[in-house]
Image (cartoon, rainbow, N blue to C red):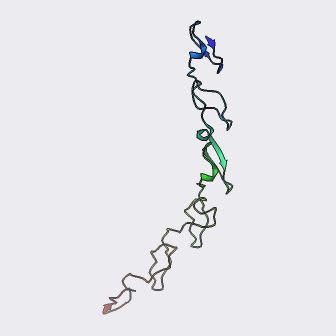
């Protein structure tokens, strides 16, 4: 085995072989501009920093830390951490920190309202909507007839 001058790896080759014609197929051990190891083979050009695939934790402007690829700029990331703030309707916010603009503007609640209407029926519309008039059959009746109208 001989040690290649370019990378320092041991390679089997004939003594008469010119080293400059030999390609080393081992993983490159050089560090690229972001201080991560190159992802290519020794004979290939090193991985550009802009496409580095190393997994790193990045701190977002909201303060949360998320795992991502080194090459992805923080400015292009949206925080995936669940918001979980209790909304005015008393349901948990279903959005993420990123979708809710760091808790400043929440996504609309999609839960059913479940508030009782003046007629006694339960509102079935989403929490974010004002409760519309009831569309169910009126439950008022006397011993000889039932009200045929809507509430």
Q: Is residue 1 above or below residue 145?
A: above
At a point 58% along the width and 71% down the height, the residue shown is 90
Of 129 and 86, which appears nearest the observer? 129
Q: Is residue 29 above or below residue 111?
A: above
Q: Quadrant of residue 43?
A: top right
Give coordinates of residue 52: x percent, y percent: 60, 38
Left or right: 122 in relation to 6 = left
Task: Point out the image quarter for the C terminus.
Answer: bottom left
Task: Point out the image quarter for the N terminus.
Answer: top right
At a point 61% along the width and 38% down the height, the residue shown is 54
Give coordinates of residue 5: x percent, y percent: 66, 17
At a point 65% along the width and 20% down the height, the residue shown is 6
Give coordinates of residue 7: x percent, y percent: 64, 21
Q: Is residue 90 above or below residue 134?
A: above
How many marks are shown on the rendered structure? 0
Q: Is residue 4 above or below residue 80?
A: above
Give coordinates of residue 119: x percent, y percent: 45, 85
At a point 45% along the width and 81% down the height, the residue shown is 132
Of 10 and 92, which appears nearest the observer? 10
Of 76 and 120, which appears nearest the observer? 76
């Amino acid at each position: 085995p001989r040690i290649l001058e370019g990378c320092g790896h041991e390679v089997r080759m004939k003594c008469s072989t010119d080293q400059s014609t030999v390609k080393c197929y081992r993983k490159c051990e050089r560090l690229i501009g972001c201080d991560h190891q190159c992802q290519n083979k020794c004979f290939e050009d090193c991985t550009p920093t802009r496409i580095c695939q190393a997994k790193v934790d990045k701190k977002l402007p909201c303060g949360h830390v998320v795992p991502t690829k080194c090459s992805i700029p923080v400015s292009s990331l949206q925080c995936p951490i669940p918001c979980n703030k209790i909304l005015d309707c008393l349901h948990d916010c279903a959005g993420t920190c990123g979708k809710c603009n760091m808790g400043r503007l929440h996504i609309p609640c999609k839960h059913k309202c479940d508030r009782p209407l003046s007629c006694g029926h339960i509102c079935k519309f989403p929490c974010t909507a004002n409760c519309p008039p009831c569309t169910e059959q009126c439950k008022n009746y006397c011993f000889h007839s039932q009200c045929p109208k809507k509430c």
